[in-house]
Amino acid sequence: MAKEELRTISRNLQELQKKLSLLIDSFQNNSKLPQHSRISLDSDDGVSRLGSASSEVVAFMKSPVGQYLDRHPFLAFTLIVFIVMSAVPVGFFLLIVMLTSLAALLGVIILEGLVIAVGGLSLLCILCGLGFVSLVMSGMMIASYVVVSSLINYWFSPRPLTQQNTSGDFLPAMKSADFEGLYQE
């Protein structure tokens, strides 16, 4: 019975060590630490691996645009919101372009130019509106994040101990030495 428990404990400890190793690797892959200062639990190769980062992401982050967006997170967040919100209108526009191109193959050339011009203008208007909406939304999200984090920091900040006097009001705890000299006549 004791041998089975010992084996179970040993297996559980090995599983926990593997999970801890994976967790540390995940933190290291997502952190901005230099590679020489990362911790590696693998005893086989003392070198930590970059792992899940693809070469395209690394190349983009080394480009001037990636470095600029890394220094300006509000702009990066606004750009992401804009790209996500503009995917559907751009998709509809491309669908209309493909359908009108198919119609042009059938001989309706004038209709294609008209539909593409109207579609292009409406896409321009929609993308301008989405740009403004994404700017406002990301500003509101960041402002609400700042407000909520400030409230949480205020609510959970350490406060001085309070004592209740006889009238039921809460007063800060004061030493008797603090009252000396207050009412001297």
Image (cartoon, helix red, strand yellow):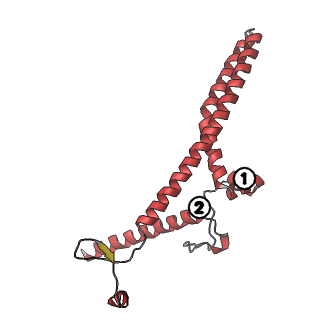
Where residue 50 appears, x then y in whole percent?
63, 63
Write the residue at 74% across / 13% down: 104
The relative height of residue 84 versus residue 50 in the rendered view (above or below) is above
Mark 1 secondary-structure assignment: helix
Residue 30's image quarter? bottom right
Visible residue check, residue 90: no
Residue 99's image quarter? top right
Residue 4's image quarter? bottom left
Q: Can you identify the residue that label 2 sits on?
A: 30
The relative height of residue 149 versus residue 114 in the rendered view (above or below) is below
Q: Is residue 171 left or right of residue 123?
A: left
Mark 1 neighbour class, 10 Å CA radius: few under 14, some 14 to 19, many 20 or more: few
- The amino acid at mark 2 is Asn
**Residue, far top:** 107
The one of 15 and 7 positioned closer to us in this rendering: 15
Mark 2 secondary-structure assignment: helix
The one of 172 and 51 positioned closer to us in this rendering: 172
Write the residue at 34% across / 83% down: 174
Where residue 97 appears, x then y in whole percent?
70, 22
Upstream in sequence: badge 1 or badge 2? 2
Which label belongs to residue 14? Answer: none
**Badge count:** 2
Q: Can you identify the residue that label 1 sits on?
A: 60
- The amino acid at mark 1 is Phe
Q: Is residue 119 left or right of residue 10?
A: right
The one of 162 and 30 positioned closer to us in this rendering: 162
Write the residue at 41% across / 73% down: 158
Quarter of the image containing the C terminus? bottom left
The relative height of residue 107 versus residue 45 in the rendered view (above or below) is above
The one of 22 and 108 positioned closer to us in this rendering: 108
Q: Gap in Å between the C-alphas at discs 1 and 2?
A: 16 Å
